[in-house]
Every structure is written in structure tokens, then in C-alpha cells.
């Protein structure tokens, strides 16, 4: 259905206001609004009413569960190999339907025993049914974060149902799951993201020293050394590491270009990153002859490319895979990281016959690779007052985030437009801030 209404900003004596106009004749509908969000909500409401008039036969008597199933199936079908939406993202709503909606939106309503949750119509799904659904799921052990995500999915569904003219109860868009006391967990880590545990610099030196001594002895040992060096020096995400190509290393500009990711489940290389800020170039510090610990990243990448020239000359990847023409997979990277942690007393693991790693216990459980990103960001932020070249924009560009603050989002990635000298100074500050010189002597060949 084509857009019938639109939001238009107007300047008035008392300041800026927003009005809703009918597209056909630009006539103002209703009152003006002081906030654009309020005007958009009004457009949503009016569009839903108009769509409902066109689709009234399909909307009347439609059950919530049936409508959500149709919505989830449609989302799965939107997933295409050459389109922006990923297969795993598209299946999110199908997962919510199978594991949450069908399972907990059934039986007598917890708030009103006279109601059966599975029979609720889309137009009547309200506060009573949402709370009953959440209570049942919470009592069955569904984690708090999963409940919050389920509510987000339901709200997304309601907006689309409204646009399709299916007459949903749009008041539920304002439901705030995080304010619903019944599902609130007592433990901090159950409600918020787990605090990332940082490995000490001494332990990192111990690990890399051991890995360096095994370099060249086996493919796994060599790859693991390379993986740990890249994670330590650049704080990359696993998919970013897999997606690096030899051409990503630009010694002319002294930069490492992150221009894509490798996700096996999505068909391989994706010429896109997690967010806008992740599509970035990270400066590489050159070697300073007066500072033996300088240029750790440059030293490593130089040696790694020499190794690839000898052993993987015809592969385009910076970390060629064990089998096939692709790069190292997430499973391989994750597996070898955990095996290394286990060797150094940071984890108790079991290796299954299929090669899958089971983590019995570890302070790094759930964040084996994220630890390096957290360490990188923490050191950079702490050093912002010490090194003049580090500010919010540069820090969030190095780490690969879209936002550090609103200004950082608007002016981010400007670091790549600097001249070579300025970029070199920034790269030097980056290595000094994160103490990259710790592993410079380890990387250097004997």
C-alpha cells in the first residue's frame, strides 16, 4: 500500500513543529506536534486505519498466533543471498514463534482465568495477554534477555500488521518489558551484559611467547600464533579476521583495511561489516629505529605475508583455510583460542570427537575473543588524556564502533583522511596506549 500520509516540519513563532499531511492534496490532518516521534506515531495510526478499511475481511477474526506465523514465514522468505538481510537475521522471528509464542501463549491466561491465550485475536492482544505470556515464559526459565528480545519481535510484528491493515492493538507498542517487575532478575549479570574479564599483560606475553616458539612446527600452531597476534594488535571481531585478504594489508598507506566479513552460514564472504563504523582502516605504526619496541603490527604483518608467500602463495586470504579455497572459519579460530587458553590454565575444556569444544569452566566463557576487543578499547579510552592524538573519534574508529557519542557518529572515520605523518603519529599512540610493544620482541625473528 502506497504512503497516504507524511510528516512535514514547519517553523512557527514558538519554534519548530511537525504536522501530518495527506500526500494526495497536502492537507493537514489533525493538530501539530512538538516532536517528530509523536507525528510519526500519528501517521502509523492513520495508515493502519486506512489499511484496515482495505483489508477488513482478512483482519476480522484473525488470531494473534496465526498472524505471527504468517509474519515469521514472510521474513524467512525475505532472506536472499544477494540481499542485505542475512539468513540468520531473517529466521529470528521464526525462532521467536517456535520457542516462545507457540510454547507460552497458550492455556488459561494468568491474569484473567476466563481467557485462553492461544485464542486471542490480533485486534485484542493487549496488556493482559502480554503479561501472561511473559509470566509463563519466565517461570519456565527463559532468560530475561530472551524475554526482552521476544517483546521487541512482537512489537515489530505489530507495526507490520498495522501497515498491512490487520487491525492489531497498537497500544502494545508502548509496552515496556524492562519495567515489568515480574520478570526482573535479581542478579546483575542476568539483567545486563556480562562484564568482560581481561587477561593480564603478563599472561598474554606468556601465551604469545609459547606460541612463537611453536611457529612453523605445525599448521595449527602457526595459525594460532597469527590469530592471537591479530586479535591483540587490532582487536578484530572473528568474522572480520576471517574476512581479511592479503590485499587488506596496505603498507603504502600503512593501514589495515577492514572491508568485509566471512560468515560460513551466510554463504561466505560478505562485502559488509557489522555496522557502519566497522567498515574501517586501522593505521599501522612503522618501525622507529630509536625505539626497538615500536612497529609491532608492521613487524608481524611483514613476517606473516612472508610466511604466506612461501606456504599459501595462491590464496587471497590473510588466514587461508585448512580445506578448500576459503579462509579460516569461526569454528577453527574459536577452537584453537580455547585450546590455547586451556594450555595456560585459563580454561577447563573437553574436546569432542567431532572437534567441538565444550567449555567446562573459564572466566572467559562467552567472551574468549571479545576479551581482546575490550582490552583494546579499555586501554585506548584510558589513554585519551595521555596521548594527544587519541580522541573519541579515533578511538571508536580503531575499535570499529559506529558510536562513541553523537559527534563521533557524524564525524567518525575521519582518521583515514589524515596525511601519512599524522596517521603514523596516531598509529604510534595506538600502540603505546595498548602496550603493543609487549610482543614486538616475540614477533621479531631470532
Image: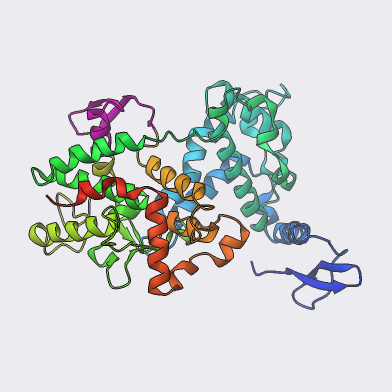
**Place of residue 358 in the rendered image (x, y in percent of width and height, measured from the top left):** 29, 28
**Position of residue 373 in the picture relative to residue 295 (left or right):** right
**Position of residue 105 in the picture relative to residue 261 (left or right):** right
151 within the magenta span: no
Please identify the residue farthest to the right as the structure is shown: 13
Q: Quadrant of residue 62?
A: top right
Instruction: Look at the image and give the residue range highlighted in magenta.
Output: 336-365
User: What residue do we see at 59% from left, 46% from top?
Assistant: 67
User: What residue do we see at 21% from left, 43% from top?
Assistant: 224
Q: Quadrant of the N terminus?
A: bottom right
**Position of residue 41 in the picture relative to residue 312 (left or right):** right
**Place of residue 108 in the rendered image (x, y in percent of width and height, measured from the top left):** 65, 23
Residue 236 at least partly seen? no
Is residue 325 depicted above or below 343 in this figure?
below
**Place of residue 68 in the rendered image (x, y in percent of width and height, measured from the top left):** 57, 44
**Place of residue 425 in the rendered image (x, y in percent of width and height, measured from the top left):** 41, 64
User: What residue do we see at 23% from left, 33% from top?
Assistant: 339
Q: Quadrant of residue 127?
A: top right
- The residue closer to the viewer here, 135 or 420, is 420
Q: How many marks?
A: 0
Is residue 141 depicted above or below 16 in this figure?
above
Q: Quadrant of residue 40?
A: bottom right
Is residue 122 depicted above or below 399 in this figure?
above
Please identify the residue farthest to the front as the structure is shown: 290
- The residue closer to the viewer here, 125 or 223, is 223
Q: How is the image coloured?
A: rainbow
User: What residue do we see at 32% from left, 67% from top?
Assistant: 254
Residue 422 at least partly seen? yes
- The residue closer to the viewer here, 325 or 389, is 389
**Position of residue 354 in the picture relative to residue 15 (left or right):** left
Amino acid at each position: 500500500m502506497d504512503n497516504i500520509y507524511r510528516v512535514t516540519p514547519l517553523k512557527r513563532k514558538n519554534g519548530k513543529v511537525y504536522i501530518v499531511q495527506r500526500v494526495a492534496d497536502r492537507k493537514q490532518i489533525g493538530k501539530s506536534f512538538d516532536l517528530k516521534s509523536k507525528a510519526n506515531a500519528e501517521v502509523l495510526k492513520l495508515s493502519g486505519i486506512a489499511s484496515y478499511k482495505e483489508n477488513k475481511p482478512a483482519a476480522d477474526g484473525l488470531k494473534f498466533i496465526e498472524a505471527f506465523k504468517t509474519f515469521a514465514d514472510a521474513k524467512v522468505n525475505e532472506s536472499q543471498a544477494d540481499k542485505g538481510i542475512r539468513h540468520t537475521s531473517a529466521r529470528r522471528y521464526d525462532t521467536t514463534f517456535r520457542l516462545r509464542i507457540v510454547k507460552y501463549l497458550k492455556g488459561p491466561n494468568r491474569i484473567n482465568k476466563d481467557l485462553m491465550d492461544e485464542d486471542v485475536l490480533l485486534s485484542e492482544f493487549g496488556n493482559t495477554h502480554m503479561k501472561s505470556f511473559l509470566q509463563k515464559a519466565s517461570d519456565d526459565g527463559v532468560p530475561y534477555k530472551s524475554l526482552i528480545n521476544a517483546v521487541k519481535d512482537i512489537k515489530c510484528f505489530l507495526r507490520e500488521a498495522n501497515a498491512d491493515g490487520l487491525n492489531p492493538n497498537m497500544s502494545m507498542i508502548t509496552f515496556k518489558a524492562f519495567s515489568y517487575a515480574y520478570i526482573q532478575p535479581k542478579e546483575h549479570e542476568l539483567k545486563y551484559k556480562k562484564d568482560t574479564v581481561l587477561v593480564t599483560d603478563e599472561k598474554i606475553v606468556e601465551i604469545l611467547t609459547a606460541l612463537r616458539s611453536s611457529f612453523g612446527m605445525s599448521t595449527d600452531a602457526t595459525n594460532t600464533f597469527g590469530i592471537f597476534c591479530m586479535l591483540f594488535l587490532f582487536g578484530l571481531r572473528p568474522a572480520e579476521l576471517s574476512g581479511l585478504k592479503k590485499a587488506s594489508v596496505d603498507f603504502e598507506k600503512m593501514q589495515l583495511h577492514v572491508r568485509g566479513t566471512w560468515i560460513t552460514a551466510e554463504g561466505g564472504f560478505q562485502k559488509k561489516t557489522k555496522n557502519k563504523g566497522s567498515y574501517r582502516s586501522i593505521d599501522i605504526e612503522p618501525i622507529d629505529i630509536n625505539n626497538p619496541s615500536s612497529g609491532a603490527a608492521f613487524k608481524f604483518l611483514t613476517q606473516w605475508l612472508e610466511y604466506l608467500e612461501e606456504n599459501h602463495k595462491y590464496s587471497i586470504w590473510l588466514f587461508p583455510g585448512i580445506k578448500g579455497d576459503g579462509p579460516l572459519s569461526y569454528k577453527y579460530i574459536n577452537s584453537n583460542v580455547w585450546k590455547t587458553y586451556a594450555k595456560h590454565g585459563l580454561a577447563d575444556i573437553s574436546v569432542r570427537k567431532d572437534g567441538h569444544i565444550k567449555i567446562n569452566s573459564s572466566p572467559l566463557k562467552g567472551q574468549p575473543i571479545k576479551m581482546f576487543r575490550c582490552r583494546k578499547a579499555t586501554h585506548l579510552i584510558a589513554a585519551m588524556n595521555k596521548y594527544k592524538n587519541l580522541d573519541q573519534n579515533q578511538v571508536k574508529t580503531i575499535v570499529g564502533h559506529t558510536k562513541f557519542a553523537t559527534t563521533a557518529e557524524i564525524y567518525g572515520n575521519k582518521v583515514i583522511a589524515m596525511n601519512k605523518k599524522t596517521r603514523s603519529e596516531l598509529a604510534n599512540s595506538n600502540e603505546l596506549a595498548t602496550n603493543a610493544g609487549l610482543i614486538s620482541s616475540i614477533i621479531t625473528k631470532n
